[in-house]
Image (tube, helix red, strand yellow):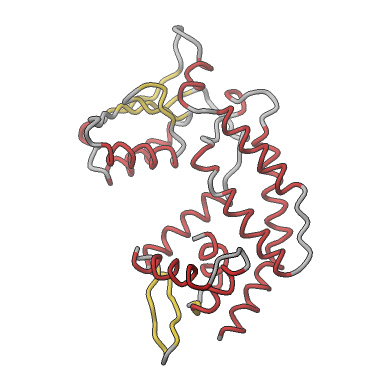
Amino acid sequence: MTILGEFVLPRGEPVWTATLVNALALFGVEEKSARQAVARTSAEGWLAAERLGRRVRWHLTPPARRLLVEGAERIYGFGSGNRDWDGRWLVVLVSVPETMRDLRHRLRTRLSWAGFGSPAPGVWIAPRADAEADAKLVLDELSLSESAMSFVASYGALGREQDMVAAAWHLDDVARRYDEFIEEFGRLRPRTPDDVLRAQTRLVHEWRRFPFLDPQLPAELLPARWSGTKATALFNDRHVRWRDGARRRWDELAEAAG
């Protein structure tokens, strides 16, 4: 999906099976496994096949295009610790029975992606009132809106706001992941065209995890010396630096397969 979003989507053209197989080979994926991955992606509804003789090329389906466009907007626009904040919280109350584990998992995954954290069972918070539209979209899709409640409020006198933040988000784990990202890509120096394509793909593939992990809290709520700010700057720098070379190499692979 990273390859589709980074190279196939911007090109706006169908992609030959051989192009995908050869690109995956750069990451050590054998041909049989690569073809199985393409077939599985098609079976999941993300790719549609077009046969030309004995050859097949693949089109992104409308759901895939929507997913990748949304993901690109979130990934490339993602940044940590740079939000202005008016001190208000959006609080969403929604309860899902323990027996409905799949629904609970989907709710947690979708709200986490939208930047919400849960400091207590059934309670979801975000440090921006306009997150209510995102919450409503998730709850509508999961048919949970009728049983949910929402409030916009400032933190009160009981307890400590930082303790609530610590309960809602595992910021120490997020910081560790940022440090690992900085360590890996800060020293990476791709030399050949294949190296550049690999580096760009790995960069985006690793970075796309952070919108699930980092709620993009305002600076007032973050620990001192928050490494997410440095990691954001590193991602933006490397992505711009490697982008043209990676896309040139992708075009070469596409032309060779065509």
User: The C terminus appears in which quarter of the rendering?
Assistant: bottom right
Give the quadrant of residue 98: top left
Query: In the displayed structure, does residue 83 sit left or right of residue 90?
Result: right
Q: Position of residue 58 (x, y in %)?
A: 44, 76
Farthest residue to the bottom: give it: 53
- Residue at screen point 45% across, 87% down: 55
Give the quadrant of residue 106: top left
- Residue at screen point 22% across, 30% down: 97
Q: Position of residue 131 (x, y in %)?
A: 42, 36
Which residue is more in the foreground, 86 or 106? 106
Query: In the displayed structure, does residue 248 sit left or right of residue 87?
Result: right
Above or below, 247 relative to 120:
below
- Residue at screen point 52% across, 53% down: 73
Query: In the displayed structure, does residue 223 sit left or right of residue 95?
Result: right
Above or below, 233 relative to 253:
above
Q: Position of residue 36 (x, y in %)?
A: 43, 69
Which residue is more in the foreground, 8 or 31? 31
Q: Position of residue 8 (x, y in %)?
A: 53, 70
Q: How many dots with numbers? A: 0
